[in-house]
Image (cartoon, helix red, strand yellow):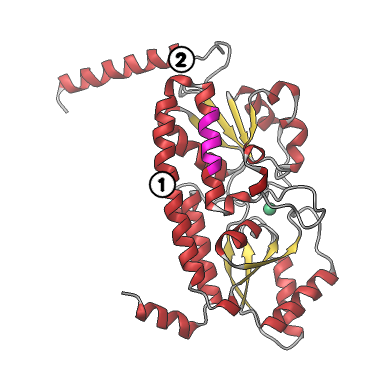
């Protein structure tokens, strides 16, 4: 690069940093971290990925919970509490997903800057929990059309708080919504390719009811919609009997739930003289590692669909489908 270009870049960087320093949106006392950008803190990795897609490079987005962390059981550490206090905007799932953080997020000092994204969605589109018939199932991200509604909620919040960048948030969101609509069509098509009698998804906890409703697959979880309650022997036996009667070929392990619960079901099925295999690991309540395809929402959905299709399609049918593909 020639010296003139370097001087130009330095000048541009200076202008940018001055501009950022001026855009403090009336919170001059808030420390902005080393990047100088407004700090967005999310609970889950899914929300961090969503926020990054909406914000672009304008805002610094960080998730509290890493890969494999179970949000139902997560408790904020002392370090988390001070990060939450420093953040300019907090995005959380709500609908009781972060059950052990309710006190902190509902705290008076944090409430003004905290947004429970799931609770801003249209109530008619949410599923009511089967366990009590009152509370809402928090796992709405597994319906890509609800996730794109969530992107619009985040866009509106960011635009309200950082109005200078509203036009950019709008452009970013439109692009991301188009990607999610395409993902939605792709997932539906791939699930439809599984032979109908095998279209049953069995996992450790009931995280996939939205997925089942959106993409036409029957869903059974061993535990309820939270991982906080242990499954009992009767639950294991009932599920095992169901698997044998329907001759379900595979069960699925979840990345944020220990595999022993689903292994207990496998053993109970074997005791009844039927063999069911473990179909692979699904991401349920957390994304994969940062920097891998599964570290994004779209990559995580694609991974899950591939694992489900491979686990539930009989080998000969899968081969026939591959041969028939153009
Ligand atoms: Zn869950």
Write the start and end of the magenta stretch as one range: 149-157
Give 107 or 129, whichever is nearer the viewer.
129
Give 313 or 175, whichever is nearer the viewer.
175
Q: Nearer the viewer, mark 1 or mark 2?
A: 1
Give 192 or 204, whichever is nearer the viewer.
192
Whether 260 is drawn above or below 6: the answer is: below
Q: Residue furthest bottom?
A: 273
Q: Secondary structure at mark 2?
A: loop
- Horizontally, residue 84 falls left or right of residue 290, namely right
At 56% from the left and 35% from the top, the residue drawn is 153
- Horizontally, residue 199 falls left or right of residue 297, namely right
The residue tagged 2 is 23
Residue 320 lies in quadrant: bottom left
Tell me the number on the disc at residue 178: 1
Residue 273: image x %, image y %?
Answer: 73, 88
Within 10 Å of disc 2 (Cα), the crowding (few <14, some 14-19, many 20+) is some
Residue 217 lies in quadrant: bottom right
At 18% from the left and 22% from the top, the residue drawn is 5
Whether 142 is drawn above or below 278: the answer is: above
Residue 318: image x %, image y %?
Answer: 45, 79
At 50% from the left and 25% from the top, the residue drawn is 159
Residue 30 visible to an observer of this rendering: yes
At 67% from the left and 44% from the top, the residue drawn is 123
Residue 292 visible to an observer of this rendering: no
């Amino acid at each position: 690069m020639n010296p003139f270009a370097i001087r130009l870049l330095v000048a541009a960087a200076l202008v940018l940093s001055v501009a950022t320093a001026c855009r403090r949106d009336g919170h001059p006392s808030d420390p902005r971290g080393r990047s100088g950008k407004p700090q967005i803190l999310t609970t889950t990795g899914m929300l961090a990925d969503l926020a990054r897609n909406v914000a672009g490079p304008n805002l610094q987005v960080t998730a509290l919970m890493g890969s494999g962390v179970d949000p139902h059981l997560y408790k904020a550490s002392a370090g988390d509490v001070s990060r939450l206090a420093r953040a300019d905007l907090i995005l959380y799932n709500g609908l009781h997903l972060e059950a052990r953080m309710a006190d902190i997020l509902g705290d008076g000092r944090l409430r003004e800057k905290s947004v429970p994204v799931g609770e801003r969605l249209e109530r008619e589109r949410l599923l009511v929990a089967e366990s009590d018939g009152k509370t809402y199932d928090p796992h709405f991200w597994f319906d890509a059309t609800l996730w794109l509604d969530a992107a619009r909620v985040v866009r509106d919040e960011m635009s309200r708080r950082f109005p200078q960048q509203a036009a950019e948030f709008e452009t970013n969101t439109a692009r991301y919504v188009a990607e999610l609509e395409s993902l939605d069509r792709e997932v539906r098509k791939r699930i439809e390719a599984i032979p109908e009698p095998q279209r049953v998804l069995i996992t450790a906890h009931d995280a996939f009811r939205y997925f089942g409703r959106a993409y036409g697959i029957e869903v059974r979880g061993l535990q309820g919609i939270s991982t906080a309650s242990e499954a009992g022997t009767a639950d294991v036996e009932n599920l095992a009997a169901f698997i044998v009667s329907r001759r379900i070929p595979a069960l699925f392990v979840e990345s944020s739930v220990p595999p022993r619960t689903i292994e207990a079901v496998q053993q109970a099925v074997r005791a009844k003289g039927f063999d069911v295999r473990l179909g692979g690991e699904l991401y349920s309540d957390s994304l994969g590692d940062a920097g891998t395809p599964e570290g994004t929402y779209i990559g995580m959905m694609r991974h899950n669909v591939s694992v489900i299709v491979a686990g539930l399609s009989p080998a000969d049918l899968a081969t026939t489908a591959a041969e028939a593909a153009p």
